[in-house]
Image (spheres, rainbow, N blue to C red):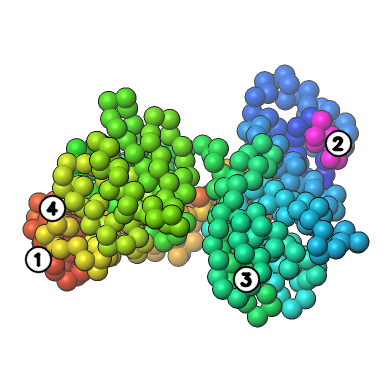
Amino acid sequence: MVDAAKAIDESVAKNFLCIGLNWEDDVLIVGMMDTLDKTEIQSLTKEITAKTGLKIQHRSVPEALLREVIETSYSQVSGVDFSAPAKFKGNSEGPIAELVNNVLDRAVRMRASDVHIEPTESDLVIRIRVDGLLEEMTRLPGATAASFVSRLKVLSKLDIVERRRPQDGQFSITLATRKIDVRLATVATLYGEKIVLRLLDTKKQMVGLSELGMSDDNLEKFQRLISSQHGLVITAGPTGSGKTTTLHSAVKTLNSPFRNVSTLEDPVEYVVPGVNHITVNESIGTGFSVQLRAILRQDPDIVLVGEMRDSETARIGVQAALAGRLVLTSLHATDVVGTIYRLFQMGIEPYLVAASLRGVVAQRLIRRCCVFCSQDAEMNAADRLLLKHYTKDTRKIQVKYGAGCTICRGTGFLDRVGAYQIFEITDEMRELISTRPNPSEIYELAEEEGLRT
C-alpha cells in the first residue's frame, strides 16, 4: 500500500492544507485543520476523494502543526536532499551557508532538541534527537565536512583554525520566522571535529503546571513547595529531563505585580513578561555566583538559578533561602535523595541543608503516545507486572499504543511528558538530614512518609 503522505499530491496538500496520516484498512486517514466546520470538512473530503479516488476519513490537526508536517513531508517525498552543489568549493560561503541553514531548518521542523554532526571516514552523518531518541536525518559527502564545521564555528565566533581542542559557543538564527538559539560544542575525533548543537526555540510556548504531567497528588505537593515564602526548592535529573521547563512553569505561576522575580540563566530559554531575566557570561567574570550576589542586592522575592554548578553558587543560594527568599534551582542528580547528598558533596553543612531545603523534584521525560494515531491495545504481561506496584486491579487500566502516522513519522510517539518524584521535607526529615545519615535511612523514612519512585 502506498505511503499515506504520498497518497495525496503535494499541490493538493498545500492548496487545501491536508495530508494523509495513515491507513485503517483501505481508508486513508487525512489530517485537516481543526478550525474547519462540519460543512467545510464534508466539502474537502469530497474534493480529495474526487482527486485521489480513495475512501477518506478526516482527523483534526492544529493548523501550525499541519503546515510544518506538510512542509517537512513533501520536501522528503520530492527528493530534496542536502547534497552539496556539483561545483561546490570548500572556501565558498554561499552554498555551505545555505546547506547549514537547510539542515538546521529541517531539524527544527522535525522538533529536534539536539543535532549531532559526525564526520566518518567517507561521510558527514547528521543525526537529530527527537523526543529523547537519536535518529539519522541525512548523510552528506565527506568533502563537505570541514566547510560545514567551519561555517558553524564562524557563526559561533569560534577559532576555525583550532581543530584539536574542544570549544564551546552559541549563536542565534531565524528559521521560518522562528528565532532559534543554538548552543554549540566541538570535540576532535579520528576523522575530524564532531559538533553537537542544542536547539532552543525562543518562541516556544510555556506550559502551565497542570500540563507538565504531574499526578493530582504530585501537583498539590509541588504547589505547596513553591508557595513557601522562603526556602530552597530543587529540580533534579539528567541533562534534557525538563528541569528548566518545570522551574519556569513555577515562575509563571508565581509571577505577579506584587513580587520581584529574577532569573539567572545560561542561556535564557523562556521569557516571562514581568520577570527580570539575567544572563551569565563566564568569559567576562559574570558567572553564576557573581550574578547571584548582585541579584540578592536587588530586593528579590523569588530567585530562579538555572543551575547550581559549583559550591560557591550553592552556598549563596542556601544563604539566600535562609534569609527569607524563595530560591528555585536545578541540580544534576539521579533522584531526590541523591540531590541531598550532592549538596553535602558541594560543601554545604547538613544543618544548613536541613534548615533551607523545602523540597526536591526529581524528574524524567518519557515519550507520549501520538494522539493522532493512538489505538486501544491489550495489556501484556510485562505491563501488568509493572503496574501491580501501583494498583491491585490492572484490569481497570486502559492501554493505548501509537500505530504510527505521518505526524509522528511512523514512531507512534509524539512529544514527551514528565514523570515526577516529589519529596517534601517534613520536620522529622529535617532532623534526620541534619545528622548527615546514610542514604538508606533517608529512603526508609521517606517511604514511610509516602514517597513514590
**Which residue is identified by label 4?**
355
In the rendered image, residue 52, in percent from the top left (x then y), is placed at 87, 37
Residue at horizontal 66 percent and vertical 36 percent from the top: 177
Residue at horizontal 14 percent and vertical 57 percent from the top: 352
Residue at horizontal 34 percent and vertical 39 percent from the top: 262
* Element marked by disc 3: loop
What type of secondary structure mainly makes up the magenta span?
Answer: helix
Q: Which numbered marker is on residue 435?
A: 1
Question: Residue 14 colored magenta?
Answer: yes
Marks 2 and 3, the one that precedes in the sequence: 2
Marks 4 and 1, the one that precedes in the sequence: 4
434 vs 39, nearest the viewer: 434
Q: Which numbered marker is on residue 11?
A: 2
2 vs 428, nearest the viewer: 428
> Please, what is the three-letter code of the amino acid marked with disc 1?
Thr
Marks 1 and 2, the one that precedes in the sequence: 2
Marks 4 and 3, the one that precedes in the sequence: 3
* Element marked by disc 4: helix
252 vs 34, nearest the viewer: 252
Mark 4, Cα crowd under 10 Å, few <14 / some 14-19 / many 20+, is some
Residue 50 higher or lower than 395, as above or below: above
> Please, what is the three-letter code of the amino acid marked with disc 3?
Glu
Q: How far apart, in angstroms, are the residues tagged by discs 1 and 2?
A: 70 Å
Q: In the drawing, does residue 120 fall left or right of residue 273?
A: right
Give the residue at the far front of this rendering: 284
Is residue 294 shown to the viewer in this render? yes
Q: How far apart, in angstroms, are the residues tagged by discs 2 and 3?
A: 47 Å
Q: How far apart, in angstroms, are the residues tagged by discs 4 and 1?
A: 12 Å
In the rendered image, residue 179, in percent from the top left (x then y), is placed at 61, 41
> Please, what is the three-letter code of the amino acid marked with disc 4?
Ala
* Element marked by disc 1: loop
> Of the residues tagged 1 and 3, which is closer to the observer?
3
